[in-house]
Image (cartoon, rainbow, N blue to C red):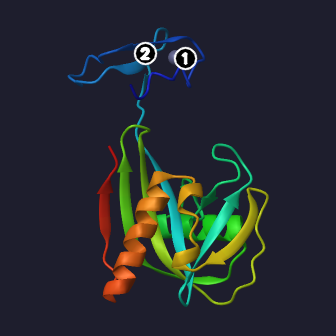
């Protein structure tokens, strides 16, 4: 079950207990046993890009857990104060050091099991020189035939790449909504 990870009140530090709030809410929440503050837990947004240069796609080899050594599209948790596209651009810059122009939204993937929503934008790379940050061992371009499908870090990345290549064959890119059970 998702949630139930809060142990202490963020307002006063006392223990919390999970119970229904008194306001008619139908979900159990972490409620402080001392100051009664209700702590809500909601899904997190992961934002990233499908960076492409001609026929090739940029993938990053992860230098962090989870999935150390596996390949991923550049993506990460959205920060407060930024838009989804700003977050996608920032994560792409941080993880690959690529120079690119952000294009339109491509995929929205719900992963209720872990309480996340992943959003990927297409990004047109301006050249093939990369400067990956510490979270990435290696950043390199792959043709469709070279994609290491068995070494892809996350299901959301695999689902996005499959739709990207499918759309490219059709010659038209849509916006894909995917529910990952
Ligand atoms: Zn409290």
The residue sitting at 37% across, 70% down in the picture is 163
Q: How many marks?
A: 2
Q: Position of residue 143 (x, y in %)?
A: 57, 80
Is ligand 1 within 8 Å of the beta carbon of the residue shown at mark 1? Answer: no
Instruction: Report, in whole angstroms, how far the alpha carbon at label 1 lies from the one at label 2.
Output: 14 Å
What residue lies at 75% left-to-right and 83% top-to-bottom?
129
- Horizontal arrangement in the rendering, residue 38 relative to residue 52 (left or right): left
Q: Nearer the viewer, residue 24 or 179?
A: 179
35 w.r.t. 104: above or below: above
Q: Position of residue 116 (x, y in %)?
A: 43, 46
Quadrant including the N terminus: top left
Element carrying mark 2:
loop
- Horizontal side of residue 29 vs 121, given as left or right: left
Pick the residue in front: 180 or 122: 180
What quarter of the picture does the C terminus occupy? top left
Residue hosting label 2: 36
For the residue carrying disc 1, how many other residues have a C-alpha within 10 Å: few (<14), some (14-19), or many (20+)?
some
């Amino acid at each position: 079950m998702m949630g139930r990870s809060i142990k202490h009140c963020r307002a006063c530090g006392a223990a919390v207990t999970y119970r229904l709030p008194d306001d008619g809410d139908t979900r159990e929440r972490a409620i402080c046993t001392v100051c009664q503050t209700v702590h809500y837990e909601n899904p997190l947004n992961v934002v990233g890009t499908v960076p492409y240069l001609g026929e090739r796609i940029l993938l990053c080899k992860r230098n962090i857990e989870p999935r150390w050594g596996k390949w991923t599209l550049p993506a990460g948790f959205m920060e407060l104060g930024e838009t989804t596209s700003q977050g996608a651009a920032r994560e792409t810059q941080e993880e690959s050091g690529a120079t690119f122009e952000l294009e339109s939204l491509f995929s929205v993937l719900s992963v209720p099991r872990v309480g996340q929503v992943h959003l990927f934008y297409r990004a047109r790379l301006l050249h093939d020189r990369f400067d990956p940050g510490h979270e990435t061992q290696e950043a390199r371009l792959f043709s469709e035939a070279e994609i290491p499908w068995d070494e892809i870090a996350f299901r959301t990345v695999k689902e996005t790449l499959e739709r990207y290549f499918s759309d490219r064959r059709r010659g038209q890119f849509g916006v894909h909504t995917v529910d990952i059970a």
